[in-house]
């Protein structure tokens, strides 16, 4: 187990290192003269040089890279050019929107997908199984933002039950915050569920064909008992992996849903800073997201190693 | 699904009835039919053909210029003669915009899928046929790229290169290539273990010859299926990026862009927010069904394994 953990840790650190170099080179290398872009067309060369100097942008690239990494390691993510706000503050202020949204979306997706996927697997070849397969096939084709638009059309405009967009701070009114999250979470969760159902269905189908399930039936369990007591535990292994794989998908969906419902989350902040060419903000925020995704995948791998001893020796 | 995201259709399980393994119960096996499989191929082909035709026609004929505002025609309802699906807030015909949108979707989706198919095949074959070190380097590299959310790649590219169709194609390529590499690698490895490969090698055939002559034709089915599924994922992703304003913009038209404009200018209550979304769903559904159907025809082994 120790070797397995060590290998995964080495991969984790290596991945973060390579990703950081790639992000840095892409943003700094292809971005042109950052200070000139930030100050706009009317800026004098002196002003551009002064800004570049005050942010250390006139130093060699590799010095800037190590400076950036060193600062990140000590918790300093840099500052915005225009507003001089700390990136760390910008990010943490937005997490109270993005984290509840993404997490609830994923949980809702799983709550729908696990029973429906299991049901679909048990009813393969029957009309109800075929209908479920078709529905999830259509769900996979629906863009998350269109789902959001349709839901706000129904619940926001027609029925008037929920706000079609905007945000109420948790500190102002927790109930208001929850209300503004309902439709975004619903859109995200439904679309996540459509994707997850297909995975759950195939994981359960896999398990249903295994010998141990036949053994469970042979010792007197009913089909449902066997599936719940023996099957579900085994099907949970691939599920853990799928959740890890879906994290990247979840982040993509969250970015779009925040725009659909005008929520002041992390991705809206990112989009605004992309438009304003705030390279330091974009660079540090992107790096944080990548560390998070790679970290979740590390956890998934470790969890997998704990749940299934076979994985430790073969990988 | 919206897939702005690292959609990995390759990892998605095949749909349809289980065809192998221990029967769940005898009656269930009798009920299994082959029909839905063929149906998905036919429906997929028809839907895809319709959109391809529309995109082709849009090159020669458009009912009106989709970019020139005609203020006296603004917000005409659907069913107006000459503008059967109505017009937008600037009086531009919806049908004309949808037709150009089909062109953009197909161009960007197919462009991203083709480039990543090319790069992924080269990398995948190299990984499968070379020594352990090359294989390990390529495979770990693909793992790392896969852990970067596609959305983030697209945003970074848009921030540095500016947005547009080309940037979108590059962003799609960046996040489809690693999954393609994995799929091609594992498919090629399966073929490389076959006896006829050993025979070819004993006969004195070089590595490149074996790959081109024996491996490629045998993984062509997998490649076609994957291409179709990534084509669909690319269309969804492009729509999402254009909706966010970091994808295609005017004078190019995209379905995602149309939805963005509809929501910002008229609000969601407008039927303008319906048509482009419907077009996306039908086109993506068609390609996914086509991919699933093709999988059964071209790659029965894969379909059986997945179920």
Image: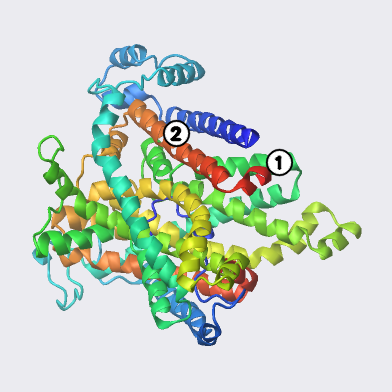
Q: Which sits in the foreground, A72 or B19?
A: B19
Looking at the image, which residue sits at the far front? Answer: A220
Q: Identify the residue at horizontal 37%, vertical 56% (top origin).
A: A110
Within 10 angstroms of label 1, few (less than 14), some, or many (20 or more) residues? some
Residue A222 picture location, percent across and down: 48, 73
Asked whether the beta carbons under mark 1 and mark 2 sit within 8 Å of each other, the answer is no
Give the left or right position of residue B155, taking residue B216 as reference: left
What residue would you read off at disc 1? B134
Give the left or right position of residue B150, taking residue B218 as reference: left
Q: How far apart in space, not on screen, are marks 1 and 2 (Cα)? A: 26 Å
Q: Report the quarter where the N terminus of chain B lies.
A: bottom left
Q: Which sits in the foreground, A268 or A162?
A: A162
Q: Identify the residue at horizontal 55%, vertical 43% (top origin).
A: A306
Residue A233 picture location, percent across and down: 50, 57
Mark drawn on residue A291: 2
Question: Is disc 2 on the same chain as disc 1?
Answer: no
Residue B191 picture location, percent across and down: 74, 61
């Amino acid at each position: 187990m120790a070797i397995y953990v060590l290998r995964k840790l080495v991969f984790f650190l290596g991945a973060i290192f390579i990703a950081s170099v790639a992000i840095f080179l892409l943003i700094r290398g292809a971005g042109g003269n950052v200070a000139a872009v930030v100050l706009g067309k009317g800026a004098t060369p002196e002003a551009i040089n002064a800004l570049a100097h005050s942010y250390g942008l006139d130093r060699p690239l590799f010095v800037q890279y190590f400076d950036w990494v060193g600062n990140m390691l000590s918790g300093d993510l840099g500052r915005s050019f225009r507003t001089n706000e700390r990136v760390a503050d910008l990010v943490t202020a937005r997490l109270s929107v993005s984290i509840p949204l993404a997490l609830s979306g994923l949980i809702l997706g799983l709550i729908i997908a696990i029973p429906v996927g299991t049901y679909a697997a048990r009813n393969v070849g029957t009309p109800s199984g075929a209908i479920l397969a078709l529905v999830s096939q259509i769900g996979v084709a629906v863009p998350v933002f269109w789902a959001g638009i349709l839901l706000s059309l129904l619940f926001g405009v027609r029925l008037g039950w929920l706000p079609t967009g905007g945000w109420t701070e948790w500190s102002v009114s927790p109930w208001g915050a929850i209300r503004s999250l309902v439709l975004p979470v619903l859109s995200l969760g439904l679309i996540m569920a459509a994707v997850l159902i297909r995975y759950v269905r195939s994981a359960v189908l896999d398990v249903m064909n295994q010998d141990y399930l036949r053994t469970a039936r042979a010792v007197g369990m009913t089909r449902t008992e066997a599936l719940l007591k023996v099957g579900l535990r085994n099907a949970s292994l691939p599920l853990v992996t799928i959740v890890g794989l879906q994290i990247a998908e979840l982040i993509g969906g969250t970015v779009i849903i925040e725009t659909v419902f005008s929520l002041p989350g992390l991705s809206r902040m990112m989009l605004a800073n992309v438009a304003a060419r705030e390279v330091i903000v974009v660079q540090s925020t992107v790096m944080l997201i990548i560390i998070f995704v790679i970290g979740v995948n590390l956890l998934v791998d470790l969890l997998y190693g704990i749940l299934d001893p076979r994985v430790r020796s073969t990988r | 699904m919206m897939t702005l995201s690292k959609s990995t259709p390759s990892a998605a399980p095949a749909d349809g009835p289980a065809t192998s393994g221990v029967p769940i119960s005898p009656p269930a096996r009798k009920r299994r039919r082959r029909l839905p499989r063929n149906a998905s191929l036919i429906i997929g082909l028809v839907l895809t053909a319709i959109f391809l035709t529309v995109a082709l026609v849009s090159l020669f004929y458009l009912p009106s210029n989709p970019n020139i505002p005609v203020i006296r025609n603004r917000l005409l309802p659907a069913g107006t003669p000459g503008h059967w699906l109505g017009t937008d807030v600037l009086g531009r015909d919806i049908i004309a915009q949808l037709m150009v949108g089909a062109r953009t979707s197909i161009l960007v989706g197919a462009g991203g899928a083709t480039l990543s198919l090319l790069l992924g095949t080269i990398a995948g074959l190299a990984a499968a046929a070379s020594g352990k070190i090359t294989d390990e380097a390529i495979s770990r590299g693909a793992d790392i790229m896969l852990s970067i959310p596609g959305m983030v790649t697209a945003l970074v590219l848009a921030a540095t290169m500016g947005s547009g169709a080309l940037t979108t194609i590059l962003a799609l390529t960046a996040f489809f290539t690693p999954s393609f590499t994995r799929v091609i690698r594992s498919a090629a490895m399966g073929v490389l273990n076959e006896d006829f490969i050993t025979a070819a090698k004993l006969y004195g055939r070089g590595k490149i010859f074996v790959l081109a002559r024996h491996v490629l034709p045998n993984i062509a089915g997998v490649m076609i299926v994957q291409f179709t599924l990534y084509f669909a994922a690319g269309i969804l992703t492009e729509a999402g990026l254009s909706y966010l304003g970091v994808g295609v913009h005017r004078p190019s038209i995209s379905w995602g862009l149309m939805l963005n404009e509809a929501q910002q200018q008229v609000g969601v209550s407008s039927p303008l927010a319906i048509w482009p979304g419907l077009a996306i769903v039908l086109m993506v559904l068609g390609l996914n069904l086509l991919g699933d159907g093709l999988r059964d025809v071209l790659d029965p082994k894969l379909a059986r394994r997945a179920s």
